[in-house]
Image (cartoon, rainbow, N blue to C red):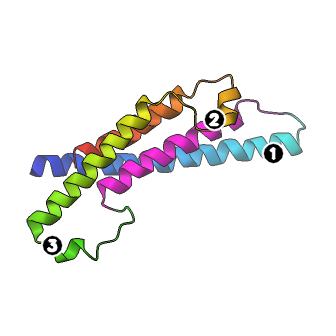
């Protein structure tokens, strides 16, 4: 169990670093987009797509990070009144339900919005981000 905890801690550190670096890259790209549009009167066609898909990936990796550090919002009034073993079982059941929802959303063929349905880009990248972002918490 200590090995799983060490792997989880390492993954949380990596996820946190990836999110910070990726968000900084989005910030730089969007700043360049604004400068090029309003100062140079030129467009960066790829910057909007980069930002859109990056925010999706950052969100789901952030979800995995929150699960890894037990940082999701939850109501613990009842949970803290249970014995320690029952608390572990309730958390395990919650994680199994979350895994089932993740698998269902990965297998879904529907797009997240009508705009994405009209887009020339498939929503596969967004669905893949759900699986990638939520898979590390399975170790925790």
Q: Which residue is mark 1?
A: 35
As drawn, the label of residue 82 is 3
Graded by Cα atoms within 10 Å as few (under 14), some (14 to 19) or many (20 or more), the crowding at tag 1 reads some
Residue located 29% across and 72% down the image: 76
Secondary structure of the residue carrying tag 2 is helix
Residue at the (63%, 35%) spot, across then down: 50
Query: Closer to the camera, 29 or 132?
Result: 132
- Residue at image x 10%, y 52%? 2
Give coordinates of residue 52: x percent, y percent. Answer: 63, 40
| Relative to 41, 98 lies left or right | left
Tell how many labels: 3
Distance from the alpha carbon under mark 3 to that under mark 1: 56 Å
Compared with 28, 69 (above or below) is below
Going from N to C along the chain, the mark reached first, 1 or 2, is 1
Question: Magenta residues, as a range?
Answer: 43-70
Judging from the image, what secondary structure is the residue with disc 3 in?
Answer: loop
Which residue bears the numbered disc 2?
50
Whole-percent x, y for residue 48 in the image: 70, 37
Write down the quadrant of residue 128 in the picture.
Answer: top left
Q: Is residue 10 left or right of residue 44?
A: left
Q: Nearer the viewer, residue 110 or 20?
A: 110
- Which of the labelled discs sits on residue 77, or is there none? none
Q: Is residue 52 magenta?
A: yes
Q: Position of residue 15 (x, y in %)?
A: 38, 47
Q: CA distance from mark 2 to mark 3?
A: 46 Å
Choose top left, top right, bottom left or bottom right for residue 36. top right
**For discs 2 and 3, the disc positioned in front in the rendered view:** 3
What type of secondary structure mainly makes up the magenta span? helix
Which of the two discs, 1 and 2, sits closer to the camera?
A: 2
């Amino acid at each position: 169990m200590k090995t799983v905890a060490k792997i989880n801690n390492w993954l949380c550190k990596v996820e946190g670093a990836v999110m910070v670096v990726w968000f900084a890259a989005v910030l730089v790209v969007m700043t360049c987009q604004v400068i090029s549009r309003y100062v140079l009167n030129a467009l960066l066609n790829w910057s909007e797509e980069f930002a859109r898909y990056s925010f999706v990936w950052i969100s789901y990796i952030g979800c995995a990070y929150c699960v890894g550090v037990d940082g999701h919002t939850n109501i613990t009034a009842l949970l803290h009144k249970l014995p320690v073993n029952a608390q572990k079982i309730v958390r395990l059941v919650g994680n199994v339900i979350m895994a089932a929802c993740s698998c269902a959303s990965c297998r879904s063929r529907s797009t997240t919005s009508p705009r994405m349905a009209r887009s020339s880009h498939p929503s596969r990248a967004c669905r893949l981000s759900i699986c990638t972002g939520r898979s590390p918490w399975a170790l925790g």
